[in-house]
Image: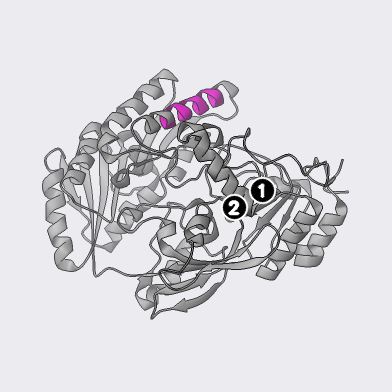
C-alpha cells in the first residue's frame, strides 16, 4: 500500500510545493543520522513558521501518520530517524535568531539555528552560548535541546538544560504552548527542564530562549603530554581530588591523537601515549593561579606540559579535538561512537576494560572523551559492509555501556537514548522507574505518533493501536514516491 498522495498534497498546501520531498532518491538523504541505524521516511517537509508546524502536526494526527522532528542530522543515537516511516519535519528553514536581549543575557532562536552561529552573532556584545558539542559548526540548537547536548566546555558550565530558560512548543495535538521564558526561574512545574532531553517525544520546540554568557577575561589552554594512557587517566583523578575545575578537560589516547594529528596538524606529539587538553577561563588572576595548580598536578606523571602561546595555537589545539571524528573517518569505512558516563575516579579502570573489550572482539577502539565529567566516547572502528564486524561492534558497544553502569555510571551523557540504546535502558532503570517515565510520555503523546519507538524498549514503546484507525499510518514506501 502506498503512502497517501493526499497527505503530500496537503503538506505542500501548508508549507509550499518546494518545501516537501517525496521522491525516493530525495528521501534516502534523510534515512540516517550520525549513528549506524537507518530507516526511510515517506515524506520530508521544511516548515518556516510555528503556525505551519502546528498545522502539519494536526494533519499527521488526523491521518495517524508518525512525525519525526530533525535538525542537522548530526545525532548519534538514531533520534532523528523515521523508525516507523511517516513524515520528517526538517528545521533547516527555521533558522532565525529572533531576539538578542543583551541586558538580560538572553536570546530567542528558532530550532534550526546552528549552535556556533549563535555565538558568532552575539560575540560583538561580548557574549557567547556555552554548550559546544564537537559538531557545533553544524548541529542546531533544536537538536541540542532534544538530546540535552554537552561538549568540552560544559564541564564548568553545564549541559544544554542549564542554558535553556524557555520554550515555545507544539504539542502532538497541534496546540502551541509556552514553557518558561526569560526569567531564570518560573513558578509551577519545571516543564522546560522536563522537555529538554526528551528527544522529540513530548512536543516540538519552535522557539528556544537561551542564556548567554559573558566572554571570559582570560583563557589559558594547556596540553599535557603523557607516555601512557594510564598516566593521563590517573592525572584526571588527581585533578579531581585537588578540586581543580577546568572549563574543559579532554583526553585523547595515542592511537586517536596520531590519527588526528595526521589529518589536522594540531600540534599533538606523535610519539605520546595520550594527551590531556585542558582549558581554564575566568578573571586573569584566577586563571594564572589555576594554571600553576594544573601544571603542578600534571607534572607528577606528564612528560611535558605546554601552554598555548597565542590564540592561533589555541585554535589549532581545539581544531584537533573538534574534528577528531572526521579524522577517524579518513582511515576507517565506518566507526561507532559510544557515549557512556562513569565517575571520574573510575577513568583508569574503565579505559583498561575498554582495551580488554577491544581485544575480545578483535576491534580497534580509540578513546577521546570529556574526561573532566567522565563522559566517554570510545570510537569503535568497523566495516559496515561486513555483517560479522557489525555484530561484534554492537556487542562491544553494549559491553562497554554495561561496564559503565556497573561502576555507577550511565548509558548516555549527551547523545541520548534514541533507538540505539532503548533496549538496554532496563540495565539502568527498574520496571517501576520505566512505568513512571512511560506514563509521563503518554500524558503528552498518547497516540505515540511523535517520534515513535524511541527511548523506551520495544516491549514498552508506542502502543500499536492507531494502525487500524488510521489506514495511512506506517504504510510502506515504493519506488518513485507516493502515488
Percent x, y of residue 470: 83, 47
Percent x, y of residue 260: 37, 42
Magenta region includes residue 400: yes
Magenta region includes residue 471: no
Q: Callout 2: helix, strand or loop?
A: loop
Mark whose residue sits in front, 2 or 1: 2
In the picture, measured across the screen, residue 121 lies left or right of residue 152, that is right
What is the basis of the colouring in this image? one colour
Judged by its main secondary structure, the magenta piece is helix
In the picture, measured across the screen, residue 48 lies left or right of residue 481, that is left
- Residue linked to disc 1: 30
The disc label shown at residue 288, or none = none
x 28%, y 38%: residue = 270
Q: Earlier in the sequence, mark 2 or mark 1?
A: 1
Residue 479 visible in rendering: yes
Percent x, y of residue 197: 50, 52
Residue 139 visible in rendering: no
Q: Which residues are magenta?
A: 389-401
Residue 215: quadrant of the picture: bottom left
User: Are the residues flagged by discs 2 and 1 in contact, CB closer than 8 Å?
Assistant: no
x 17%, y 41%: residue = 238
x 80%, y 63%: residue = 12
At label 2, counting other C-alpha atoms closer than 10 Å, the crowd grade (few under 14, some 14-19, many 20 or more) is many
Q: Considering the image in quadrants, where does the N terminus appear? A: top right
Q: Mark 2 and mark 1: span between their CA atoms?
A: 16 Å
Residue 354: quadrant of the picture: top left
How many tags in the picture?
A: 2
Percent x, y of residue 40: 71, 42
Q: Nearer the viewer, residue 11 or 302?
A: 11
Q: Is residue 13 above or below residue 2?
A: below
At label 1, counting other C-alpha atoms closer than 10 Å, the crowd grade (few under 14, some 14-19, many 20 or more) is many
The disc label shown at residue 200, or none = 2
Amino acid at each position: 500500500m502506498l503512502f497517501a498522495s493526499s497527505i503530500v498534497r496537503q503538506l505542500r498546501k501548508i508549507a509550499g510545493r518546494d518545501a516537501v520531498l517525496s521522491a525516493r532518491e530525495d528521501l534516502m538523504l534523510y534515512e540516517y543520522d550520525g549513528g549506524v541505524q537507518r530507516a526511510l521516511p515517506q515524506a520530508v517537509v521544511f516548515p518556516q513558521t510555528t503556525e505551519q508546524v502546528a498545522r502539519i502536526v494536526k494533519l499527521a494526527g488526523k491521518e495517524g501518520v508518525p512525525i519525526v522532528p530533525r535538525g542537522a542530522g548530526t545525532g548519534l543515537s538514531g533520534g532523528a530517524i523515521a523508525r516507523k516511516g511517516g513524515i520528517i519535519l526538517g528545521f533547516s528553514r527555521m533558522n532565525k535568531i529572533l531576539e538578542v536581549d543583551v541586558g538580560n543575557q538572553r536570546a530567542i532562536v528558532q530550532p534550526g539555528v546552528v549552535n556556533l552561529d549563535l555565538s558568532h552573532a552575539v560575540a560583538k556584545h561580548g557574549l557567547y552560548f556555552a554548550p559546544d558539542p564537537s559538531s557545533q559548526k553544524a548541529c542546531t540548537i533544536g537538536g541540542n535541546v532534544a538530546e540535552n547536548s554537552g561538549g568540552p566546555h560544559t564541564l564548568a558550565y553545564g549541559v544544554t538544560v542549564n542554558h535553556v530558560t524557555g520554550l515555545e512548543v507544539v504539542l502532538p495535538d497541534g496546540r502551541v504552548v509556552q514553557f518558561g521564558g526569560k526569567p531564570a526561574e518560573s513558578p509551577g512545574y519545571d516543564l522546560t527542564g522536563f522537555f529538554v532531553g526528551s528527544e522529540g517525544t513530548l512536543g516540538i520546540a519552535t522557539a528556544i530562549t537561551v542564556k548567554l554568557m559573558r566572554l571570559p577575561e582570560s583563557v589559558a589552554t594547556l596540553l599535557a603530554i603523557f607516555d601512557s594512557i594510564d598516566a593521563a587517566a590517573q592525572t584526571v583523578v588527581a585533578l579531581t581530588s585537588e578540586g581543580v575545575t577546568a572549563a574543559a578537560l579532554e583526553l585523547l589516547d595515542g592511537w586517536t591523537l596520531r590519527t588526528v594529528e595526521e589529518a589536522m596538524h594540531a600540534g599533538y606529539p606523535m610519539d605520546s601515549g595520550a594527551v590531556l587538553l585542558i582549558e581554564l577561563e575566568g578573571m586573569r588572576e584566577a586563571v594564572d593561579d589555576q594554571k600553576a595548580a594544573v601544571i603542578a598536578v600534571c607534572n607528577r606523571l606528564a612528560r611535558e606540559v605546554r601552554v598555548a602561546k597565542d590564540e592561533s595555537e589555541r585554535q589549532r589545539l581545539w581544531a584537533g579535538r573538534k574534528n577528531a571524528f572526521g579524522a577517524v573517518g579518513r582511515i576507517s569505512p565506518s566507526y561507532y561512537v559510544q557515549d557512556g558516563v562513569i565517575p571520574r575516579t573510575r577513568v583508569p579502570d574503565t579505559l583498561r576494560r575498554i582495551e580488554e573489550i577491544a581485544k575480545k572482539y578483535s576491534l580497534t577502539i580509540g578513546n577521546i572523551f570529556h574526561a573532566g565529567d567522565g563522559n566517554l566516547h570510545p570510537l569503535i572502528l568497523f566495516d559496515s559492509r561486513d555483517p560479522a564486524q557489525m555484530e561484534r561492534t554492537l556487542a562491544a558497544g553494549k559491553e562497554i555501556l554495561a561496564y559503565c553502569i556497573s561502576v555507577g555510571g550511565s548509558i548516555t551523557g549527551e547523545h541520548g537514548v534514541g533507538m540505539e540504546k532503548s533496549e538496554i535502558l532496563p540495565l539502568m532503570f527498574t520496571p517501576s522507574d520505566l512505568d513512571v517515565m512511560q506514563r509521563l510520555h503518554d500524558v503528552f503523546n498518547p497516540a505515540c505518533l511523535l517520534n515513535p519507538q524511541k527511548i523506551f524498549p520495544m516491549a514498552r514503546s508506542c502502543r500499536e493501536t492507531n494502525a487500524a484507525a488510521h489506514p495511512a499510518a506506517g504504510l510502506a514506501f515504493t519506488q518513485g514516491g507516493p502515488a
